[in-house]
Amino acid sequence: MTSKRTVAALPGELTIAFTREFEAPAALVFRAHTEEDLIGKWIGPIGTHMRMREWDARTGGSWSYVVVSGSGNGEWAFHGAFHEVTEPSRLVQTWEFEGNPGHPNLEILEFADLDGGRSRLTGLSVFPTLEDRDGMLADMDGGMDENFNRLDGLIAAGELG
Amino acid sequence: MTSKRTVAALPGELTIAFTREFEAPAALVFRAHTEEDLIGKWIGPIGTHMRMREWDARTGGSWSYVVVSGSGNGEWAFHGAFHEVTEPSRLVQTWEFEGNPGHPNLEILEFADLDGGRSRLTGLSVFPTLEDRDGMLADMDGGMDENFNRLDGLIAAGELG
């Protein structure tokens, strides 16, 4: 599945850019990113589950959740604000891991239809410092693939409607 | 007054960093940035006024206002989300000019007391693209000074309490 994903993060730059293609229209992939009952089904490593604290996916809303390990002994909390929610094409949000407080980033996601009922997600995350960007890059390698592979599974199972 | 301000925005980088000192404690300068009845008294060029559309200065809240020219013929609208509001030391928000939609930035403001009842504001704005950063840099030259000079006036007049 990796061939469907591209990532660009040049040394010395503050951004991570990626693209990922899905076997579903943009509107469904957008829903998977914005609907409270869907987001917890694919964010987080396999074997974890999500405990939602707040989810208000509208321009000016905010979000907060905890990813809980299968044993229940590990928890990783995250929160942010929705700067823009424009269905079905654009989502701009802030993002912060509470285990490393004070290091927010800004994420811009764009959802575009391709031929044949497929779509492409284009993402750009921008970080306040190089250390923040490089730390995220180390953490996300593999994690992004695992999330998006879980999302592929939901699409294949028809769980997005 | 310019000697109290520093700005760093290196060619080819996505950030604008600044510092500005005030003749008031950090708590008062923080209030000027977060209280609805104060923000409109110093944001915007001299001769304009602010029409508030939404102001909810808490972590996960959002904001929206219009700067109106003295003649009433010009309007400039802005909106964003409050990622973090930690009184009196830290404010993290998104920011977008509606006249140039789709170009948000992330702003981190830190308020620290100095000796003698003075304080220093440290700001870092990070932009998704170089064009966005350079466009803001061109617009803010002078504008930032004018805003902060207006804020100096409020402090001198005792209007922050």
Image (cartoon, coloured by chain):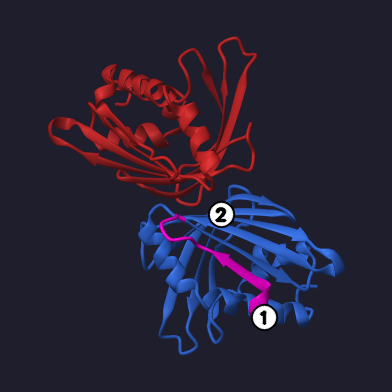
Chain colours: A red, B blue
For the residues beneath circles 2 and 1, the answer to whether they share a chain is: yes
Give the class, few, some or many, for how many residues have Cα within 10 Å of label 2's Cα (few <14, many ≥20). many
Q: Quadrant of residue A7?
A: top left
**Farthest residue in the right direction?**
B116
Vertical arrangement, residue B161 with respect to residue B46, above or below: above
What is the chain identity of the residue bearing mark 1? B
Callout 2: SS: strand
The residue at the point 63 percent across, 35 percent down is A100
Towards the viewer: B13 or B36? B13
Q: Which residue carries the number 2 mark?
A: B93
Mark 1 — residue?
B1
What is the three-letter code of the residue carrying label 2? Gln
When the figure is inspected, residue A83 is found, relative to residue A42, above or below; the finding is below
Q: Are marks 2 and 1 in contact (CB under 8 Å)?
A: no
Seen at 35% across and 35% down, the residue is: A31
Residue type at the position of mark 1: Met
* Rendered image quadrant of residue B160: bottom right
- Classify residue A78 as left or right of residue A111: right
Residue at the far top in the pictured view:
A71
Looking at the rendered image, the quarter that the C terminus of chain A falls into is top left
Q: Secondary structure at mark 1?
A: loop
Identify the mark nearer the N-term, 2 or 1. 1
Residue B136, visible in the rendered structure: yes
Magenta span of residues? B1-14
Q: Nearer the viewer, mark 2 or mark 1?
A: 1
- Identify the subunit bearing mark 2: B
Question: Is A38 part of what is drawn in magenta?
Answer: no
**Residue A117 % position (x, y):** 17, 31
Residue B146: x %, y % from top left = 58, 79
A13 lies above or below A118: below
Q: Tell me how far mark 2 sits from mark 1, CA to CA.
A: 26 Å
